Image (spheres, rainbow, N blue to C red):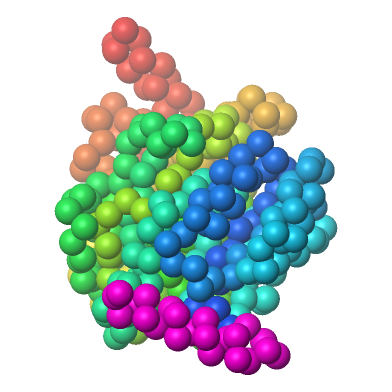
Amino acid sequence: MTKLQNQEKKHILENSLNKTEIVPAVSVIVPVYNAEKFLRHCVDSIIAQTFSDFELILVDDGSKDNSGSICDEYAEKDRRISVIHKKNGGVSSARNRGISKAKGKYICFADSDDYLSEFYLQELLALAEQYPEYDNIWCGFSIVSDYQGTSVGRSVFSEDASVSLCGTEDFVDLHKKWLDPMPWNKLYVNDILKSHNIIFDTDISVGEDLLFNLKYLDCSNKKIALLNKTVYNYVRDGKESLDNKYYPNLFDVYKKVHTKMYKYGEKWGLNDESLNEILIFAFYKYEAALENTFSKDNNISKKEKYKYNNTILNSCEFQKAFKCASKDLNILYKLAYTTKNYRFVRIVQSFIKILKR
């Protein structure tokens, strides 16, 4: 029996003797909204964990289908499961309600349309035990298209189950590997979240996870232990992306997120090369915002779309990011963006598409 298993048994025994309140080692928070088609896959994967000293908090965010009933069904069968039913307020508000109720020493998150490896909690808790001086416990994940684990790609890191010990100086590399933005591949210390009032921003629906993680990293001791192993399955099929949904004021959201990221980078003492990389990240997000303006779901006139995008091109935030990114741009795009007129950018896009045929 491993040291972690012994501690788990001891913790369960102590809780059984304390009849007033059960304090689990970890709280798993799952926001739920209209998830009846896939919710059972997620919950079953949590119940099947090899590490059993957890509480599962299902937050039904005003679902209009049978999700709420499914949550209640599971809670009746397993005392570790509790359900919060609330008015619809979005995934961030649901996660925040879960945080407010969580009793565990640690908190982790799962999305209702994803599922966990059976060793997910065991691996994360073992890593936290092995590196108690590290407040940030991260792991790898698989990007899959279904619940049979059909892979469609994964984040870029080794698969040898080694551990990478990182700090804020590695932030840019971790961001490039898409390991920092999401909450579900991380173990959080509950006391850090509560003492610093770290919650998800409910005013935005893009980038809020990254803002949450940036604040947590800043309030922690800034040490990151990364398990180079995929123990979480991110199901991509059917999830909305910027390619098929219109987000109003997307540029303002990205500006907020990347301005914060840059300021944290300065605070953490990142070198000029890393700070420039953050500006390059911002440029490509701003490009996505420009494209998003021309979504078919944006009902303003084409003239107004061009006018709005021209204000973006002329903003100091875009120009600062463009200056860093321009050295790597196609010369035609570079010239088009230099004009600060989005019509020329669209013309270049059309021309390049023709050349690629």
Q: Position of residue 23 (x, y in %)?
A: 58, 83
Q: Position of residue 167 (x, y in %)?
A: 25, 73
Q: Position of residue 174 (x, y in %)?
A: 28, 59
Picture layout, residue 353 above or below residue 297 = above
Residue, far top: 357
* Residue 224 lies in quadrant: bottom left
Q: Which residues are magenta?
A: 1-22
Picture layout, residue 114 above or below residue 337 = below
Q: Nearer the viewer, residue 27 or 250?
A: 27
- Residue drawn at x 45%, y 86% is 10
Q: Position of residue 25 (x, y in %)?
A: 49, 78
- Residue drawn at x 61%, y 34% is 245
| Residue 15 within the magenta-colored segment of the rendering | yes
- Residue drawn at x 40%, y 59% is 120
- Residue drawn at x 39%, y 32% is 150
Q: Is residue 38 left or right of residue 149?
A: right
| Residue 267 within the magenta-colored segment of the rendering | no
